[in-house]
Image: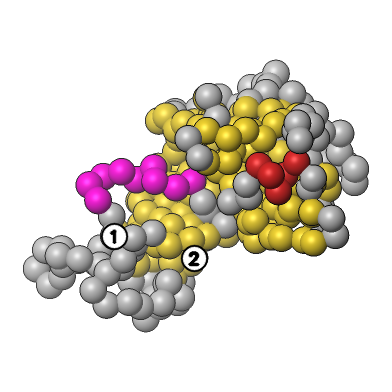
Amino acid sequence: MSGRTKPRAGSAWALALAACLALAAPALRAADLQVSPISLEFKQAEQAQALWLSNTGSQPVRAQLRVYAWSQDGGTEKLEPSGELVASPPAVVIAAGSRQLVRLVRPQAAAVTAEKSFRVVIDELPALAPGGSRPGLAFLLRYSVPVFVSTVDDPVPPAKPQRALSGRVTQEDGKTWLTLSNAGQRRVRLSHLVLDNGGTRVTLVDGLLGYVLAGRTMRWEISARLPQLVSGRLSARLDSDAQEQPLPLEPLAP
């Protein structure tokens, strides 16, 4: 889940919810800040889990962590500050070639009746220049790590999990949209979106498309046109499936 953006404008940090966002700079360098794992899941009453930040470079790296409740409303992503999950410590300095443990803690680890979703946003901060001042521009990384709190004691999904997806394809203002609703109790992760039209396969999204959270609806703009979709079939990999599966979409009128 990674990608790069054009230079940042203002403080619109929520431009993307991918796991890793990179911002432009005058001098490009390697990504020294690494985060592991790239997603986390708590059991329903589990209190803490570990997130590791690593510095693969030759200079110290500064980073800050912020936690947001993550929801989907009207087909769009929504992040709001939350105290239900806390990053400790919220800011770190990682020595060259070292790694730092950050604990993600639920202050009140009560059982939940519906799956909860969070995003931990990790921002690499500009290095301090001699004297404590900041340089004018720097090449920075942003990671956005999805974190889920399960409704069960064993959140590992079965080999063939039951999913309750439904959806449709529409066209608005010359754009084609894929809308999916998840009536299940667990989020669904979608990747590798493929259009199969009479035996001709076209990959519309090669990597991550996104998530549909439990009980929510999400939509994405796709590059296929409606005439292609009438006679074709959209498939995607769901969660950790190795193969694409046909998406359960309403039929399109020819």
> Residue at image x 52%, y 41%?
175
**In the image, which residues are magenta?**
9-17
Secondary structure state at the residue bearing disc 2 = strand
The answer to whether residue 70 shows anywhere in this view is no
Q: Position of residue 54 (x, y in %)?
A: 48, 67
Q: Is residue 97 above or below residue 211?
A: below
* Residue 3 to residue 218: above or below: below
- Name the amino acid type tagged 1: Pro
**Is 177 contained in the magenta span?**
no
- Crowding at dot 2, Cα within 10 Å, few <14 / some 14-19 / many 20+, comes out as some
Disc 1 target residue: 7
In the picture, measured across the screen, residue 86 lies left or right of residue 51, that is: left
Disc assigned to residue 34: 2
Task: Work out how far the residue at label 2 is from the one at label 1, CA to CA, in angstroms.
Answer: 21 Å
Q: Position of residue 140 (x, y in %)?
A: 33, 63
Residue depth check, mark 2 versus mark 1: number of the one nearer the observer: 1
In the rendered structure, are the residues bearing label 2 and label 1 in contact, judged by CB atoms less than 8 Å apart? no
Q: How many marks?
A: 2
Q: Which residue is at 58% across, 35% downward?
A: 171
Answer few, some or many: residues within 10 Å of disc 1's Cα (few below 14, many 20 plus, some between 14 and 19).
few
User: On the picture, is 135 further left or further right than 95?
Assistant: left
- Front one among 2 and 195: 195
Residue at the image position 65 percent from the left and 61 percent from the top = 206
Q: Quadrant of the N terminus?
A: bottom right
How far from the left and from the top, in percent, is residue 208? 62, 53
Which amino acid is tagged 2?
A: Gln
In this orientation, which residue lies closer to the viewer: 218 or 23?
218
